[in-house]
């Protein structure tokens, strides 16, 4: 297919320059960007008064957890997990996960997310939904062995099952990655297995890292070193690691992360809602660590809206450091787009010739996005996912004028409501 | 006029109970709330799958400042003010203010705000716009004398002009209030004049209070006491004071605020973006201080979205105190509705028989608001202003199915764009 997007304000290239013009898409790539392109295309989109942005990359979420949205809030972490989240998760069947992923992915597409990194269970169902909806995804089965060998073997089996499933699907938009849950829930044996298997298969790894003060203390007590030191000593770290949270990090840990070229995924809403803490953004940036952005699961957010997440990221660091110049709009915008792509070694998250055609068109003909002055500032500070109008993923129009073309929105909403009404 | 809203999920009464049913509006009041009301009305709204909420009360903003949205961000406060905000404000004529207020009020109505408290200049223009749009407002001229008697007389004259203008307008939806800018910009003489004139006229007072650490230090140096102590000694404080920000407050000051029944307006986005600090919410709540919610002006937010503001309020205190139980959804929801009404001594901000018919209907047939579990949690944590569908103010339908009926949205957007393009 070929698509011509005409007369938009384009957020172009690495430096997010704003240029007025057209974008020509051929197959799954951006072929040309320029003013007044004289090219015929199968589909023409008029983007007058609209902004053309790289699609957002949600670098850490648990998509089916939308099933738990609003289940319980404002509670201490352990009470929330033990009395609400875990009992419901125990009841979730593959059918539930299928519909939950549909709702979560529908929400992400509607908010301009074109790629996400996921960790949960029954992930074959999520892969089916990714295939069906047309989004791009990196999927992992969340492994937890708590040092138990029998459990470890079950987790390895589940992981290999997902690897095989995704291989067979053979979709250009779906990638497998390894998902050891965290250093405090995975044994060194499991982590070593993951590292070896990742080397063998060339697949990436995602993991939770230093989210809470408590888990860092626990690891220190258990291993006599910090989590990042522990992982480094295992030989676990590398530029194929996407580590979520990174809230409680020592200077030495930040140095190691930079040296090993690990990506940290910032999840401000979740870190705020669960009162985990504030990621040391200035130190990480100064050290040169690649920072991507994620929403985490809906149970601890409670939405999967990357535009809202950007605002939270820009605001929380300013007030935390009492410095209004920290986390400026462009820096945050890059986290939500090109830094996520860098983490995934994906030629996306950017509008330029040759990049994958993963694009969000945002309607600026709305009171809260006017006057149009600084486009990136408006997206970070004034927009929300609802403002996204059209989404193109891998060169295909997945949402047009607010309507997702690949699935039946009403059916999904009703089905999920029925499932959840029965579940609780 | 009479309106019947049918089959909605109603957020009812002081405790925000969720009841499924109908609301019957007669004139400008909520006349009946119940299930299956058998009443005929001039207008019937089907609220199936929708949530009926009290309209939001934005208790502190500067509505025309939407003209400055995105003008400059991520800067130190004084650079932002001196090099960007003030030079543009100097150029603003009454015509600019008129169109700016139109855009700001349009944005507020679209986001479910039914009442706002404003402080700026050329406020007669804002009053005209309030009258035209159908929103409810409390309007003040922001007075600054910096101890200069001549300036003080100008400010007093401007204030009395606005008082007279609003009196003549004689609108049931528009109230005047006094707007001495802050203790650090107003002399004791001006503050005393305001107190006396407020007593004489029965009008309320709004003021900025303890927003930055710096201004508190300045007042201490100048007067040998904290700002709240200083105002209390002047006899300035009372239950007719709506004080914005309240970020840097000593325990003694909180005690005085509680004793004098002063309302503090929380402005989390602005306090975060300008890196002012975090309001001591737990101490204020414990002392029994009434806390309302506001967006502040768009230049320091950059939106006027009360639903988004609620999420920020709920999140920032959790991470600041590292306690996830602080600032729970219901507490924050009350700040955005009934606490604002309490501050204004207004029988609104609540759905119950006899209250003013100021209502927002929110469409929950959207992926990010499903499954419907906890309605108030969804509004605080998952919704944005874009989800508001219909707005009723003073018994009149002002927005229906996303379309504001009292003004031409496209005309306003285009006119403001032209103004701002010329201005910079």
Image (spheres, coloured by chain):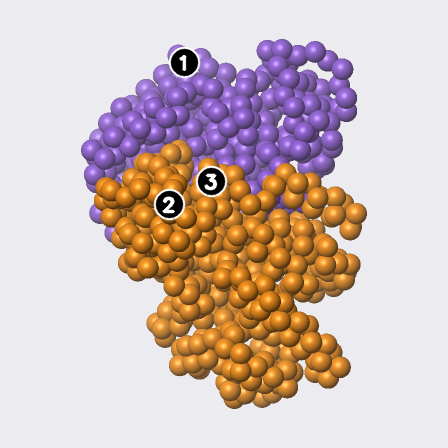
Chain colours: A orange, B purple
Which quadrant would residue A153 be assigned to in this image? Answer: bottom right
- Say which residue appears at 65% left-offset and 63% top-offset: A124
The crowd level at tag 1 (other Cα within 10 Å; few <14, some 14-19, many 20+) is some
Chain bearing mark 1: B
Cβ–Cβ below 8 Å for labels 3 and 1?
A: no
The reply to whether label 2 and label 1 mark residues of one chain is no
Q: Position of residue B382 (x, y in %)?
A: 58, 46
Chain bearing mark 2: A
- Numbered disc 3: secondary structure: strand
Q: Position of residue A369 (x, y in %)?
A: 38, 39
- Numbered disc 1: secondary structure: helix
Using the image as rendered, state which of residue A198 and residue B125 is in the foreground.
Answer: A198
- Whether residue B210 appears in this view of the structure is no
Q: Is residue A82 above or below residue B379?
A: below
Q: Position of residue A306 (x, y in %)?
A: 48, 52
The crowd level at tag 3 (other Cα within 10 Å; few <14, some 14-19, many 20+) is some
Between disc 3 and disc 1, the foreground one is: 3
Q: Is residue A242 above or below residue B144?
A: below
The crowd level at tag 2 (other Cα within 10 Å; few <14, some 14-19, many 20+) is many
Using the image as rendered, state which of residue B103 and residue A324 is in the foreground.
Answer: B103
Residue A3, numbered label: 2
The reply to whether label 2 and label 3 mark residues of one chain is yes
Using the image as rendered, state which of residue A191 and residue B200 is in the foreground.
Answer: A191
Looking at the image, is mark 2 or mark 3 earlier in the sequence?
2
State the residue position of label 1. B169
Left or right side of A410 for A250: left
- Numbered disc 2: secondary structure: strand
Residue A400, numbered label: 3
């Amino acid at each position: 297919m070929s698509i011509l997007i005409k007369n938009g304000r384009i957020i172009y290239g690495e430096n997010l320059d704003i240029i007025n013009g057209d974008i020509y898409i051929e197959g799954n790539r951006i072929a040309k960007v320029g003013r007044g392109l004289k090219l015929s295309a199968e589909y023409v989109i008029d983007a007058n008064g609209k902004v053309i942005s790289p699609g957002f990359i949600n670098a850490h979420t648990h998509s089916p957890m939308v099933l738990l949205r609003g289940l319980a809030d404002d509670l201490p972490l352990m009470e929330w997990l033990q009395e609400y989240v875990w009992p419901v998760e125990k009841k979730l069947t593959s059918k539930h996960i299928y519909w939950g992923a549909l709702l979560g992915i529908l929400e992400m597409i509607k908010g301009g997310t074109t790629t996400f990194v996921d960790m949960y269970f029954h992930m074959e169902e999520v892969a089916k939904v990714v295939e069906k909806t047309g989004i791009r995804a990196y999927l992992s089965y969340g492994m937890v062995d708590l040092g138990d060998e029998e459990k470890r073997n079950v987790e390895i089996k589940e992981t290999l099952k997902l690897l095989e499933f995704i291989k067979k699907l053979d979709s250009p938009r779906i990638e497998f990655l390894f998902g050891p849950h965290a250093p405090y829930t995975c044994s060194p044996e499991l982590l070593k297995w993951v590292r070896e298997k990742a080397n063998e298969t060339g697949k990436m790894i995602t993991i939770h890292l230093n989210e809470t003060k408590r888990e860092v203390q626990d690891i220190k007590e258990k291993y006599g070193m910090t989590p990042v030191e522990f992982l480094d000593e295992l030989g676990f770290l590398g530029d194929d690691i996407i580590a979520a949270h990174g809230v409680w990090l020592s200077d030495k840990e930040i140095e190691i992360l930079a040296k090993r070229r690990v990506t940290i995924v910032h999840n401000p809403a979740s870190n705020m809602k669960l009162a985990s803490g504030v990621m040391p953004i200035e130190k990480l940036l100064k050290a040169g660590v690649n920072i991507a952005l994620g929403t985490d699961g809906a149970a601890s957010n409670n939405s999967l809206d990357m535009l809202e997440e950007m605002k939270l990221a820009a605001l929380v660091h300013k007030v935390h450091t009492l410095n209004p110049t920290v986390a400026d709009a462009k820096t945050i915008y890059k986290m939500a787009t090109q830094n996520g792509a860098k983490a995934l070694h994906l030629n996306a998250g950017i509008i330029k010739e040759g990049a994958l055609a993963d694009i969000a068109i945002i309607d600026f003909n709305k009171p809260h996005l006017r006057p149009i002055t600084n486009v990136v500032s408006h997206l970070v500070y004034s927009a929300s996912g609802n403002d996204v109008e059209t989404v193109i993923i891998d060169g295909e129009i997945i949402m047009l004028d607010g309507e997702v073309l690949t699935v039946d929105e009403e059916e999904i909403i009703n089905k999920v409501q029925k499932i959840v009404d029965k579940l609780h």
